[in-house]
Amino acid sequence: MRDNLFNKQSDIADFRFDQDVVKVFDDMVRRSVPGYDSMIQMIGLIARMYGQDNTNYYDLGSSTGAITLSIALNNKSKNNQFFAIDNSKKMVEQCEKNLHNKVDNLQAICDDINQVKINSASIVVLNLTLQFIDVNLRSNLIKKIYDGLESGGILIISEKIHFDDAVTQNQITKLHMDFKKENGYSELEIANKRQAIENVLITETKEQHLNRLRDCGFVETSCFFQCLNFVSFLSVK
Ligand SMILES: C[S@@+](CC[C@H](N)C(=O)[O-])C[C@H]1O[C@@H](n2cnc3c(N)ncnc32)[C@H](O)[C@@H]1O
């Protein structure tokens, strides 16, 4: 369904992943995140390379299940358990519907990713999710993931970022707005969504992400995707 949630001049409440957003999520994310489909595709290919037999795969902040599906379709390893975890009940219901009969050994779980255990993992993905976690809790979450990974296991993080340099920040922000306008969003919709999301989506710089990953134990992190202000990191334990 087409996203027109923010096309009215009205009081804007903080953004929530509720039933209204679930209905339009797939359209919204594709028209808002440059390169979203490439991210999904690359994560499937990377998972195929790093997945290990007899391990668990975690999709944290799984929304409608696109990452879990891409990993499952690419998976060459044996005896893997898939965990798709989201704290929006409506998202989990939609994920279950979308992946029914498509992903074996799937548990779609409604829970806070700060509370769930990560065990015997070879693949953990936070695709556009860490940005919604309280900044003060981010290191604990990454450290928990590091501890729950098998040797050679990976963490993939995709995020919206910002830039310290004001000129770059302005240019990239302008290009991102142009991208959204090209995809049919009006200036009013863009402004309303920005107002709704600004208290809940907290961006950091690339350096902040890389420093945190290193501090949490990942000695090897590469950036495998960037389009405007969206990046994806691959960290190997
Ligand atoms: C932008 S969406 C993620 C998109 C999805 N990973 C994909 O690639 O299509 C962010 C998701 O994170 C979930 N989320 C935010 N905070 C969470 C938390 N503390 N625990 C679990 N899920 C959370 C939201 O409900 C939402 O579905």
Image (spheres, grey):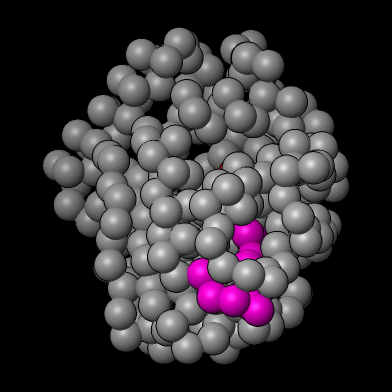
Quadrant in the rendering for residue 208: bottom left
Tell me residue 62's x, y (percent).
66, 51
Residue depicted at 72% across the width and 50% down the height: 103
Is 225 situated above or below 112? above
Q: Nearer the viewer, residue 133 or 43?
A: 43
Is 195 situated above or below 130? above
Quadrant the C terminus occupies: bottom left
Residue depicted at 65% across the width and 79% down the height: 54
Tell me residue 43's x, y (percent).
45, 53
Quadrant in the rendering for residue 117: bottom right
Tell me residue 175's x, y (percent).
26, 28
Would residue 59 appear left or right of 188 to someone viewing this image?
right
Q: Is residue 9 magenta?
A: no
Would residue 233 appear left or right of 23 to someone viewing this image?
left
Q: Nearer the viewer, residue 237 or 14?
A: 237
Residue depicted at 52% across the width and 42% down the height: 198
Residue depicted at 37% across the width and 36% down the height: 35
Is 182 situated above or below 129? above
Stretch of the chain drawn in magenta:
51-60
Quadrant the N terminus occupies: top right
Q: Nearer the viewer, residue 205 or 143?
A: 143
Tell me residue 42's x, y (percent).
39, 49
Residue 173 appears in the figure:
yes
Is 24 situated above or below 122? above
Quadrant in the rendering for residue 58: bottom right
Total number of numbered discs in the rendering:
0
Q: Is residue 55 magenta?
A: yes
Residue 91 appears in the figure:
no
